Image: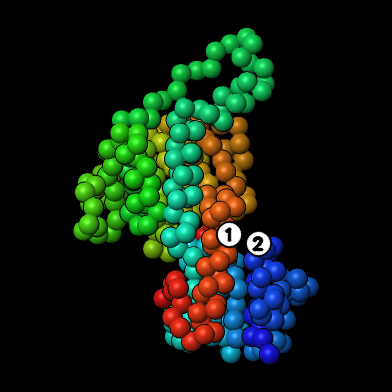
Amino acid sequence: MSHRLLQLGPLLPALETRLSTQYDVHALWKETDPKAFLAAHGGEFIGVVTSARYGADKALIDAMPALKVISSFGVGLDAFDLDAARTRGIAVGYTPDVLNDCVADTAFALLMDVSRGVSAADRFVRRGDWLTGQFPLATKVSGKRLGILGLGRIGRAIARRASGFDMQVRYHNRNAVPDVDYGYAPTLRELAEWCDYLVIASAGGDGTRGLVSREILDALGPKGFLINISRGTVTDQDALVDALVHKRIAGAGLDVFTHEPQVPEALMALDNVVLLPHVASNTHETRADMGQRVEDNLAAFFAGRSLVSSAL
Ligand code: 8YV
């Protein structure tokens, strides 16, 4: 008999197909009343397949007394109650590392775009404005100062890319990272004051909520750009919108928002903002690798081995 897994939301079709050949997978989101289903059948499942987006909160974990393993598609853990999982001895797998390159590439795509006006210039051409006018001057990227909030795996991949643009790099973390040569800014405010581009690469969740506040945006200033490929919650989104509308910062490249897929209406008309629908890891190659890690974590668990990537 194959192990029973509860899948919380849609995943890559290829991954769903492969999982369904190895496990007895039930799609919770297809239930008309998922809460009632959980209350009646939560005890029948040993595993959960989910993603950074759907997470696994305390209510879900509490409703699943036989749960032993959670395998998540994604690196973010802000939608998970890891303490509840730890207390119950539930293994939690996720997919770090395999997405570093694509997320770092996206950070640079946003940085280049908002600074040089790539998307805005494309709109200019399509509108026919080139026939009658010149696109305004943009801001040079090479040689500028890059500040990274969160020098983890993704932050380091972003820092490495900066060397190709002859940029100086500094970072802010709770503590200085011992094995890097980049300058450490003891406060986020100092980093924001110093840099031309502030890139948010920290984890989401309660520990970082609202960290990029009005004060930090004002420290970044009217020539500074903000790039966010992490979580919308790391910014005070209202303060960010206000700073962009009133040009108290130069611009922003945003892949993430506080209430996805809702994007503040005030940003839609601004040419100093590049808006992406949370696609930083969204390539064929990386998504395939993430799917493989979801499978490998489950396979390791059911073979009695440690998970390939454990979140605990
Ligand atoms: C994905 C992400 O969009 O890994 C993360 O934390 O935010 C992204 O890679 C997400 O996992 C898909 O649900």
Q: Amino acid at mark 1?
A: Ala
Q: In this orientation, which residue lies closer to the viewer: 1 or 112?
A: 1
Q: How is the image coloured?
A: rainbow
Residue 178: image x %, image y %? 21, 58
Q: Residue at x 35, y 30 (%)?
A: 142
Q: Can you give x and y, in whole percent of width and height, for residue 216 in the image?
A: 35, 44
Quick check: can you spot residue 76? no
**What's the CA distance linking mark 1 and mark 2?**
8 Å
Ligand 1 quadrant in view:
bottom right
Q: Earlier in the sequence, mark 1 or mark 2?
A: 2
In the rendered image, residue 22, in percent from the top left (x then y), is placed at 66, 78
Q: Are marks 1 and 2 in contact (CB under 8 Å)?
A: yes
> Which residue occupies 67% across, 63% down?
14
Query: Residue 100: which numbered mark, if any?
Result: none
Looking at the image, residue 246 sits to the left or right of residue 266; the answer is: left
Q: Residues within 10 Å of mark 1 (few under 14, many from 20)?
A: some
For numbered disc 1, what is the local secondary structure? helix
Beta carbon of the mark 2 residue lies under 8 A of ligand 1: no
Name the residue: 76% across, 74% down.
Answer: 31
Q: Which residue is mark 1?
A: 288
Image position of 125 with respect to 85: above or below: above
The residue carrying pointer 2 sits among few (fewer than 14), some (14 to 19) or many (20 or more) residues within 10 Å by Cα, namely few
The one of 85 and 104 positioned closer to us in this rendering: 104
Q: Which residue is mark 2?
A: 12
Name the residue at the right extreme.
32
Q: Quadrant of residue 176?
A: bottom left
Q: Which image quarter: residue 286?
A: bottom right
